Image (cartoon, grey):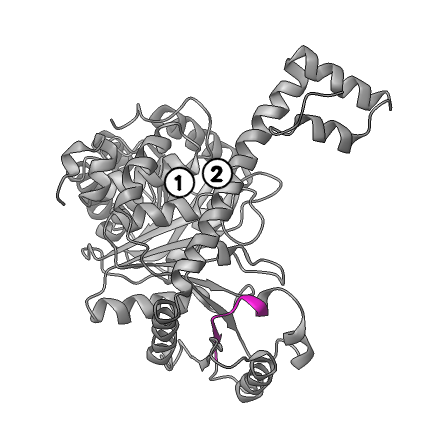
């Protein structure tokens, strides 16, 4: 890698493909370790906006097996692949069992694959707070693409959209009638629908219901999500699934939506970061800073309402009258 | 840079639980995985029939603080030292490894000398396993 000599050592090791350094950098991001800031800012100019393909859908639909099959396919085609598999953290103990690695059958000596399990650590929406920045580290480390497996999702777990360039919604037969497809949330974010376990009866009906849903929302010239049937038991449809993902990635380039989507995602990332930082700082100051403590006292005493207090705390707020 | 890069802030302990070798009984490993989860750890469960190479690779990619190996097949005297040697080879010899399963006392003594940090037989309590795992991981991170 040219010019990597100027980078701080931990970042240089990541871009030079040191897998141990990469794993540690991901941990630093997950743990909110101060060392993560320097690594992330050093590697950012080297990221290439590689495809990040998200796989989301309810618990047990076969996301891990599907990703395992796709990794084999992509490796056979000479592409290097990183996988981030997110599982939930317990809201009670904070602990987690990260079990997606069980399905992973990559060869132990294949440096073209990197698999990382990640606990959600309290984040809502199906991914962890560190997933986006971890995928950026994997980009800087030179992988051709990243596959992200979300937590088994509910109807509103759509945070993958803020990370992935292509979102695959994975379903199975018999999840419900066609009215389910009209409900808000999960179905709205699909760039590709995958009906997995399509060796089971009911797969054709599920695909038909989805086709009807897609037809209702289709607009001339815009991307219309294809519906692919797969079976990891019979290893069927995995090629077609990847063809559909690639078609969407090509569409993103041809239509200019890749740039627009990335711009939108980066804007939301910046806003999120500011919200976190300002929030943490304010929380500390509201009790620590005497003048702000006075403001909080007035709200507690009902002489000021919470919205008016918030107005006075906005960075752009004028001095209070 | 092995252990100094972490901030003093406590992060959840990451532990890899794997079964090397060919026996298919993973009930014990699952019970331990669950107990460690309930103690607040992030347990990467790699499952059955893992080769030493796969175990070490997983440990490195997942950046774990601790590795737990479960074995009932009797192949511990060949597989465990192999895991330890591969960790060393990958500059990760400082990651503590503990083990559980059917391991005769004499073998257990030799494995401890070889670098397995703790060995639990069928009579061990979950509490004992969790406390030891916490101690080993905290000393490492």
Residue A88, given in percent of the width and then of the height, sits at 53, 50
Residue A56 magenta-highlighted: no
Front-lying residue, A30 or B32:
A30
Disc 1, SS: strand
Q: In the image, which disc is placed on residue A292?
A: none
The quadrant of the picture occupied by the C terminus of chain B is: top left
Left-right relation of B19 to A280: left
Ranked by sequence position, the earlier of labels 1 and 2 is 1
As displayed, is residue B48 above or below residue B6?
below
Front-lying residue, A96 or A209:
A209
The quadrant of the picture occupied by the N terminus of chain B is: top left
As displayed, is residue A289 above or below residue B36?
above
Q: How crowded is mark 1: few (under 14 residues within 10 Å), some or many (20 or more)?
A: many
Q: In the image, which disc is placed on residue B41?
A: 2
Protein chain holding label 1: B
Q: Which residue is drawn at 61% across and 30% down?
A: A316
Where are the magenta residues, as a range?
Answer: A187-197
């Amino acid at each position: 890698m040219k010019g990597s000599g100027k980078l701080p050592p931990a970042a240089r090791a990541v871009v030079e493909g040191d897998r141990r350094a990469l794993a540690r950098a991901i941990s630093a991001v997950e743990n909110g370790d101060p060392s993560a800031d320097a690594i992330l800012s050093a590697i950012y100019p080297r990221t290439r906006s590689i495809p990040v393909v998200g796989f989301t859908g309810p618990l047990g639909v076969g996301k891990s097996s599907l990703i395992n099959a796709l990794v084999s396919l992509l490796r056979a085609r000479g592409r290097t692949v990183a996988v981030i598999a997110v599982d939930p953290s317990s809201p009670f103990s904070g602990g987690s069992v990260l079990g997606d690695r069980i399905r992973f059958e990559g060869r132990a000596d294949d440096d073209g694959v990197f698999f990382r399990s990640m606990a959600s650590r309290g984040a809502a929406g199906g991914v962890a707070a560190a997933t986006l920045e971890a995928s950026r580290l994997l980009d800087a480390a030179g992988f051709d693409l990243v596959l992200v497996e979300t937590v088994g999702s509910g109807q509103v777990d759509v945070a993958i959209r803020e990370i992935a360039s292509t979102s695959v919604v994975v379903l199975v037969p018999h999840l419900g009638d066609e009215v389910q497809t009209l409900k808000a949330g999960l179905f709205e974010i699909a760039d590709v629908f995958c009906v997995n376990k399509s060796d089971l009866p009911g797969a054709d009906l599920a695909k038909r219901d989805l086709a009807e849903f897609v037809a209702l929302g289709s607009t001339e010239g815009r991307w219309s999500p294809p519906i692919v049937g797969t079976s990891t038991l019979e290893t069927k449809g995995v090629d077609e699934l990847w063809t559909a993902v690639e078609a969407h990635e090509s569409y993103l380039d041809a239509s200019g939506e890749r740039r627009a989507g990335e711009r939108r995602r980066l804007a939301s990332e910046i806003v999120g970061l500011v919200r976190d930082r300002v929030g943490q700082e304010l929380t500390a100051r509201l009790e620590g800073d005497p003048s702000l403590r006075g403001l909080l006292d007035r709200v507690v005493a009902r002489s000021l309402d919470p919205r008016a207090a918030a107005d006075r705390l906005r960075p752009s707020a004028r001095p209070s009258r | 840079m092995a252990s100094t890069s972490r901030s003093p802030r406590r992060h959840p302990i990451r532990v890899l639980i794997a079964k090397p070798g060919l026996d298919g009984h993973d009930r014990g490993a699952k019970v331990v995985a669950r107990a460690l989860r309930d103690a607040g750890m992030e347990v990467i469960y790699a499952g059955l029939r893992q080769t030493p190479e796969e175990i070490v690779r997983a440990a490195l990619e997942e950046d774990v603080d601790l590795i737990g190996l479960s074995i009932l097949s009797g192949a511990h005297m060949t597989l465990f030292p192999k895991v330890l040697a591969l960790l060393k080879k990958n500059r990760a010899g400082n990651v503590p490894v503990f083990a559980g399963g059917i391991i005769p006392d004499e073998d257990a003594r030799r494995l401890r000398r070889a670098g397995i940090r703790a060995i639990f037989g069928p009579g061990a309590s979950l509490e004992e396993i969790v406390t030891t795992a916490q101690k080993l991981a905290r000393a490492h991170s």
